[in-house]
Amino acid sequence: MSSDTHETALYCGDPPMQFANLFRRDPAGGYTALFRKRPVFWSFNTRVAIRAACDLLALQPGDEVLVPAYNCGSEVDPLIDAGLSVRLYPVSDNLLADPDRIAPLITERTRAIYVTHYFGVIQPSLTGLRALCDRHGLRLIEDCALSLLSGQTPAEGRVGDVSVFCFYKFVPVLGGGALVINAPDLHAEHPFTRPPPRKMVTKMLLRAGLGNVLGTARLKGLVQALRGGEQIPVDMCPERELEDIPSHYYFDPALRSTRMSAFAARPLRAFSVSEAIATRRANWERYRELLADVAGVRMLVPELTVDSCPLNMPVLVEERDRVVQALQHGGIGATPWWAGFNRNLDWTGQAEAMALKNDAVSLPLHQYLSEAHVDYIVSELKRALQG
């Protein structure tokens, strides 16, 4: 049996056997081993990888890319930096990139379709999207930033012409992204030739160190104190009065072609992939059990397939910002998931995705949390929902 076939077998079948095999054989290469025998290039962050993908795919200024309306906004900005015309396609609360809803949007200017795997769940419509792109001669960009550990062989991302990945969302490293080339007609020597930005890396190190010592809540309080006790103002899109995404989400052209920092590359070889998958799935199952009868909460991902490793537990609640604030006050790393709207996009007619962006809460379930942590988070969520 070849090594590739053996690795595939490890990730198939019932989850208990799957993870038992992984615990017996956790590759010494850690997370970097997920990309063995694949043309992979390591970038400073995922946005840098996306920007490099635009050049690799020979996309020209004015070319149109169809992008899911349910987006963070940060992944879209490198496309805009490349001069591309970004057009949104609809995504509802089933989180599906539906080829039947995308096909009518294709025009003579369309050159690529961008697809995102949400919350660690691989899009079930990939085969249809690939066929749609092939019929129209389009490129497919596969965003695996949220699905690094999902798939029959984790770090799946094998259907798009290119795929991009993110590491810091799954392990505590300073940034780090990857660009994988799948299309046989694409070739790259060294897309990330420039060193990582020293000042930015230093700032990230300081922030990580202070966060470990003070905790997230105290660090946030310290930042506000240094600013004179004032809250950081919320940027708005003046013409539509939509809340903007944070300013640092926008792509910095100075980061083009920068490679991964050593503070990300070295630790990635040491983390246990199998333990992360098993613990994240166990925490997700605990959430599902505890949230089943909680009024006012709806799970965005109601079922987890055997090859899914969740990034977080996404739920929909009313008064999302108030609930998140209450959870954060209790020391819980909940976030208003993907709050804000990239000001360079036309959000007209995207009510479904906008509702998701306004109501979704991300509850943590990473591998450093125990069952007791999840129990506490749900108890505090119930308290927050009661106001």
Image (tube, helix red, strand yellow):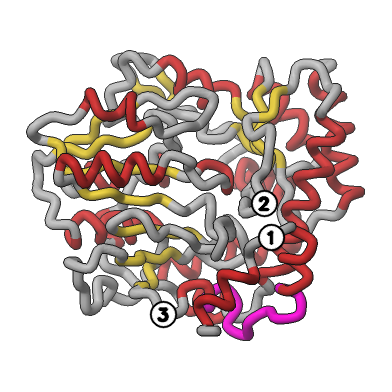
Question: Measuring 68% from the left and 37% from the top, which residue is drawn there?
Answer: 303
Residue 96 % position (x, y): 46, 32
Reply above or below: 164 against 241.
below
Q: Is residue 190 magenta?
A: no
Q: Which residue is mark 3?
A: 37
Mark 1 belongs to which amino acid?
A: Gly
Q: Nearer the viewer, mark 3 or mark 1?
A: 1
Task: Tell me where residue 21 sits by quadrant.
Answer: bottom right
Q: Residues within 10 Å of mark 2 (few under 14, many from 20)?
A: some
Secondary structure found at label 2: loop
Q: Residues within 10 Å of mark 1 (few under 14, many from 20)?
A: few
Residue 113 % position (x, y): 27, 41
Q: Which residue is mark 2?
A: 306
Q: Residues within 10 Å of mark 3 (few under 14, many from 20)?
A: few
Q: Nearer the viewer, mark 1 or mark 2?
A: 1
For residue 25, side relative to residue 64 (left or right): right
Cα–Cα gap, marks 3 and 1: 24 Å
Question: Measuring 62% from the left and 54% from the top, which residue is drawn there?
Answer: 307
Q: Which residue is mark 1?
A: 13
Q: Earlier in the sequence, mark 1 or mark 2?
A: 1
Cα–Cα gap, marks 3 and 2: 24 Å
Cα–Cα gap, marks 1 and 2: 8 Å
Secondary structure found at label 1: loop
What is the magenta range? Answer: 22-33
Q: CB of mark 1 within 8 Å of CB of mark 2? A: yes
Given residues 161 and 131, the one toward you in this image is 131
Task: Tell me where residue 193 sits by quadrant.
Answer: bottom left
Quadrant of the snapshot with the N terminus: bottom right
